[in-house]
Image: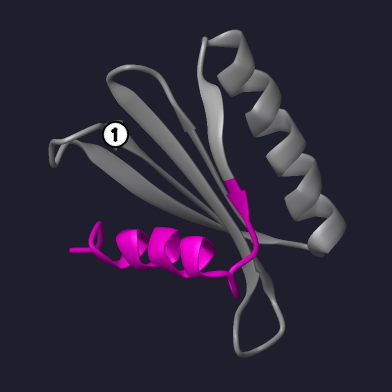
Amino acid sequence: MIIRWETDHDYVLVHIHQDMFGDWIFSRAWGQIGTQFGGLRHQLADDRDQALMWLADEATIQASRGFRKVLEEEDHTPEGREAVSQLSLLGP
């Protein structure tokens, strides 16, 4: 699952997925649209429910900051795969 929020200048992207060991990963990327400024953080969740709880918290935070949801897709859709591919561009 991948969700993206935006303002006119900033974005936040969350990706929830299982790794090859079956662990649930909550990845959060943020930054300024059109620049290289931002960051990426990965958290290991105890289970899918915890990752979804973190997602609900993130949605509340972003709404309170004036961000609007612009994407919510599963990884297997073309839009979801494109959004996930952007995460790899943020690495070192």
Residue density around tag 1, few if under 14, some if 14–19, many if 20 or more, within 10 Å: some
Q: Secondary structure at mark 1?
A: strand
**In the image, is residue 42 above or below residue 30?**
below
Q: Position of residue 54 (x, y in %)?
A: 71, 41
Look at mark 1 in the image and give the residue it sits on.
31
State whether residue 14 is above or below residue 42.
above
Q: Quadrant of the N terminus?
A: bottom right
Q: Residue at x 32, y 60 (%)?
A: 86
Q: Position of residue 72 (x, y in %)?
A: 62, 47
Q: Residue furthest front?
A: 78
Residue at coordinates 40% horizontally, 64% vertically from top-left?
A: 82
Q: Is residue 86 left or right of residue 53?
A: left
Q: Quadrant of residue 11?
A: top left
Amino acid type indicated by mark 1: Gly
Q: Quadrant of residue 33?
A: top left
Magenta stretch in the rendered image? 72-92
**Does residue 82 lie above or below 11 as drawn?**
below
Q: Nearer the viewer, residue 37 or 73?
A: 73
Q: Position of residue 79 (x, y in %)?
A: 48, 61
